[in-house]
Image (tube, rainbow, N blue to C red):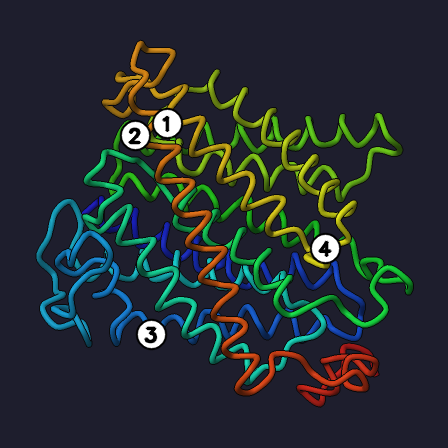
Amino acid sequence: MINSSFILICTAMVMLMTPAVGIFYGGLVRKKNLISMLMLSFISFALVTVQWIFFGYSLAFGPDIAGFIGGLDYVFLNGVGMDGEPIPDLLFMVFQLVFAAITLAIITSAVAERVKLSAFIIFGLLWTTLIYDPLAHWMWGGGWASQLGALDFAGGIVVHIGAGFGALALALAVGSRFGYGDHNMEPHNIPLTLLGGALLWFGWFGFNAGSALGVNEVAINAFIVTNISASCGALSWLAAAWIKGKPSSMGMISGAIAGLGAITPAAGFVGPMAAVCIGIVAGLVCYGAMLVRLKKNWDESLDAWAIHGVGGLWGTIALGIFAIPAIGGVAGIFSGNFGLIQVQIIAAVAAVVYAFAGTFALAKIVDSFIGLRVSEDEEYVGLDIAQHGETIYP
């Protein structure tokens, strides 16, 4: 019973992260698009909830088919009940549901201020079904990557690589906002973004510690290294940005999210000192990725790719370096095992390619049928009014 109580709490914490993404992103856009960003996160949660209980959970965790996808044994939650260890199957299902929901919310970074809600709903349903569910099956549902021996404790591949590299592909497919690079598109409310970041940091304890699926030593370790990596990521990004200019609050919170994303795949396998290294490197490489995006003039301006994608990629590889048997039962390079990092790289590269190529193809298909973007006039007016008939200010 104590395990179930713990996972119920963790599930609620992770659920809060989906609207927190909307708050985080909402502060980064212009004020005429704040409601739109919040709406996209709430829609992500509602849409994935229905998809997950109808067939998504079965595709991710049903009996393996060719190492790629799960079968349809659990459609409409057939056979998913109160049996199971260490927690009931039904509770495991809803814990995984909130992971799937936040992943779709993260990818909304790619279409900020320019996506039609109707098109996003169709795209989101297809993306969760054809991109997220297979990735979850590969790593957690008995698919080819888990059979190979690849590890992902809480979603470095499934959530962060999937959403981050998917976001980059989606941004390239949908194109830049009108006037991008010429007009002022600065964040309209930095305190709102900091609040969203704080809620994400809080929810991440449920995200990572809950992935131990019980009250145990692994959960305690995951909780501790999550905080360490986030703190180190915040400080290293802050320091790197300070060298080039001023120590901004946006750099600090971005570094924290980078550290959180990087520790996610490794939280159940590495110790506190490894988390220091993982967090520091995450802040630096994700900051560097943001500079690459700016140089390339890619309008993935809320930086899901730079923070989540690159951070998750680094953390997945770092697991193969720093894993120690005393914590998760597996050994990385520093414990004398050079085999784990090889399978980590194979799984990570496969996820990058699949998420990027698959997302780009889906975006082009949806765009060709109904169009992903609003009109230039609607974009000028802002999506809050054009799409929702609402405004944050009277």
Q: Are marks 1 and 2 in contact (CB under 8 Å)?
A: yes
Check disc 2 and report the residue beneath it: 218
At label 1, the amino acid type is: Asn
Callout 2 secondary element: helix
At label 2, the amino acid type is: Val
Q: What residue sits 29% from the left and 35% below the top?
A: 150
Camera-near label (2 vs 4) is 4
Q: What distance separates the C-alpha of mark 2 from that of mark 4?
A: 39 Å
At label 3, the amino acid type is: Gln
Callout 4 secondary element: loop
At label 4, the amino acid type is: Trp
Q: Are marks 2 and 4 in contact (CB under 8 Å)?
A: no
Check disc 4 and report the residue beneath it: 298
Check disc 3 and report the residue beneath it: 51
Where does residue 181 sit, x and y in percent of width and height?
A: 86, 59
Quick one: label 1, few (<14), some, or many (20+) residues within 10 Å?
Answer: many
Residue 53 or residue 164, whichever sits in front? 164
Compared across the picture, whether 200 is left or right of 26 comes to left
Please, is residue 129 above or below residue 350 in the view? below
In primary-sequence order, the first of circles 4 and 3 is 3
Labels in figure, total: 4
Q: What distance separates the C-alpha of mark 2 from that of mark 3?
A: 31 Å
Quick one: label 2, few (<14), some, or many (20+) residues within 10 Å?
Answer: many
Q: What distance separates the C-alpha of mark 1 from that of mark 4?
A: 38 Å
In primary-sequence order, the first of circles 2 and 3 is 3
Where does residue 261 sit, x and y in percent of width and height?
A: 51, 40
Q: What distance separates the C-alpha of mark 1 from that of mark 2?
A: 5 Å
